[in-house]
């Protein structure tokens, strides 16, 4: 045989240790999951407790998909996840920097405008010193 069972499943787990390793848990945890949550393991006919077990990897995968759901990301009390919060903080910093730059540019432009107005007033006053002669 090439390591596959008759049903074509290449992963046949033959003891609690193999099942636990496959699921990334401890032996006692997967045994508890069998008792409390119905982890799909198979035993010899007529034997129910403390006997040899086998499990098919595809059955375990299906059970995990059906039994367990992904947790929602943790939030910090205001409904925003820490990852989202870090993103918002970075955006806030970028906006603060852009605002500061715009304020500096606006201030410089306003100073130029005030200077131009003063020059205009000076030029206008100089022209009014000697009003044009009317003939």
Image (spheres, rainbow, N blue to C red):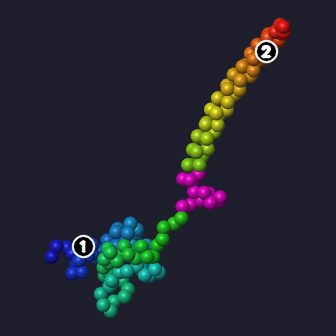
The answer to whether residue 32 is visible is: no
From this view, report whether residue 134 is shown above or below residue 109.
above
Q: Nearer the viewer, residue 77 or 44?
A: 77
- Residue at the spot 32% in from the left edge and 78% down from the top edge: 55
Label 1 crowd (10 A; few <14 / some 14-19 / many >=20): some
From this view, report whether residue 123 is shown above or below residue 13.
above
User: Which label lies toward us, 2 or 1?
Assistant: 2
Single out the residue that lies furthest toward the bottom: 46
**52 on left or right of 116:** left
Residue 89 at x, y percent in the picture: 60, 46
Q: Helix, strand, or loop for circle 2?
A: helix
**88 on left or right of 126:** left
The answer to whether residue 98 is visible is: yes
- Residue at the spot 24% in from the left edge and 80% down from the top edge: 7
The CA span between labels 2 and 1 is 95 Å
Q: Which residue is mark 1?
A: 10
Question: Where the N terminus falls, by quadrant?
Answer: bottom left
Q: Earlier in the sequence, mark 2 or mark 1?
A: 1
Q: Which residue is mark 2?
A: 124
Q: Nearer the viewer, residue 122 or 49?
A: 122
Residue 11 at x, y percent in the picture: 27, 72
Residue 104 at x, y percent in the picture: 66, 29
Magenta region, residue range: 73-85
């Amino acid at each position: 045989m090439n390591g596959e069972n008759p049903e074509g499943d290449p992963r046949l787990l033959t003891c609690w240790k193999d099942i636990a390793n496959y699921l990334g848990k401890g032996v006692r945890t997967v045994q508890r999951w069998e008792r409390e949550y119905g982890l799909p393991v198979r035993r010899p006919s007529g034997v129910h407790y403390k006997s040899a077990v086998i499990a098919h990897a595809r059955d375990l995968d299906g059970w995990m998909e059906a039994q367990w759901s992904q947790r929602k990301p943790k939030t910090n009390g205001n409904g925003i996840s820490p990852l989202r919060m870090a993103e918002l903080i970075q955006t806030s910093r970028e906006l603060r920097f852009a605002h500061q730059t715009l304020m500096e540019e606006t201030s410089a432009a306003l100073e130029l405008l005030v200077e131009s107005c003063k020059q205009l007033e000076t030029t206008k006053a100089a022209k009014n010193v000697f009003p044009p002669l009317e003939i």
